[in-house]
Image (cartoon, rainbow, N blue to C red):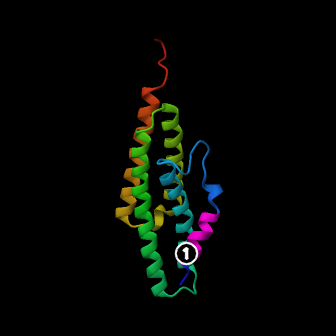
Amino acid sequence: MVDKKALYTAVMAQLEQHTHKGIDPDSKVGKPILSISVANEITHSLNQYMDNPDTTQRQRELALNERTALTDLVNDKSMQALTEIKNLHYTSERKTHTAALQGVLTEFADNHGQSIGKTQEKALQSAQKAIADYSNEINRSHSPRLGR
């Protein structure tokens, strides 16, 4: 079985590639966004592992359980990040963080949406809709009005 600790360590070593402009990875909002980005990489590695012909059926089952747990984590972190974004004081910060959250969640959904269960897919779509709705709300409520 693949060494989980080594897998997580390898992904975390690539931390810089997961940082987003204007996002503090140590903040209440940045941590869940970073978690989603890292989960995307780990899920990709798990998929490769499961596709390897040398991987036994039992190892595939364990990797699938891990992938399921990661997808649940992504859904939870998405909603946690959205809640924290709504608490940010400045509109510019809310817009920056919402865009980053949308980006990492869309990347995860595009990369892994076909390989997850229907319940998880619906939860992921629900999170994406909630984030898109909030993005539209902040852009609509704080955009300059024409003709006034």
Depicted 115 relative to depicted 75: above or below? below
Which one is in front, 62 or 25? 25
Q: In which quarter of the image is residue 17?
A: bottom right
Q: Position of residue 58 (x, y in %)?
A: 45, 86
Indicate yes or no whether the magenta region holds residue 57: no
Q: In this view, does 83 lie to the left or right of 4?
A: left
Report helix, strand or loop for mark 1.
helix
Q: Residue most toward the top?
A: 148
Indicate yes or no whether the magenta region holds residue 7: yes
Q: Is residue 125 left or right of residue 24?
A: left
The residue lying at 54 percent from left, 57 percent from top is 37
Magenta residue span: 4-13
Q: Position of residue 81 (x, y in %)?
A: 44, 49
The residue lying at 40 percent from left, 51 percent from top is 80
Q: Where is residue 44 in the image (x, y as percent from the top left)?
A: 56, 68
Q: In this view, does 66 lie to the left or right of 34?
A: left
Count of numbered circles on the image: 1
Q: Where is residue 97 in the image (x, y as percent from the top left)?
A: 51, 42
Q: In which quarter of the image is residue 84?
A: top left
Q: Name the residue carrying label 1.
A: 5
Q: Residue most toward the left?
A: 119
- Bin the neighbour count of mark 1 within 10 Å (Cα to Cα): few under 14, some 14-19, many 20 and up: few
Which one is in front, 76 or 60? 76
- State the predominant SS element of the stretch in magenta: helix
Disc 1 marks which amino acid?
A: Lys
Which one is in front, 111 or 3? 3
Q: In which quarter of the image is residue 5?
A: bottom right
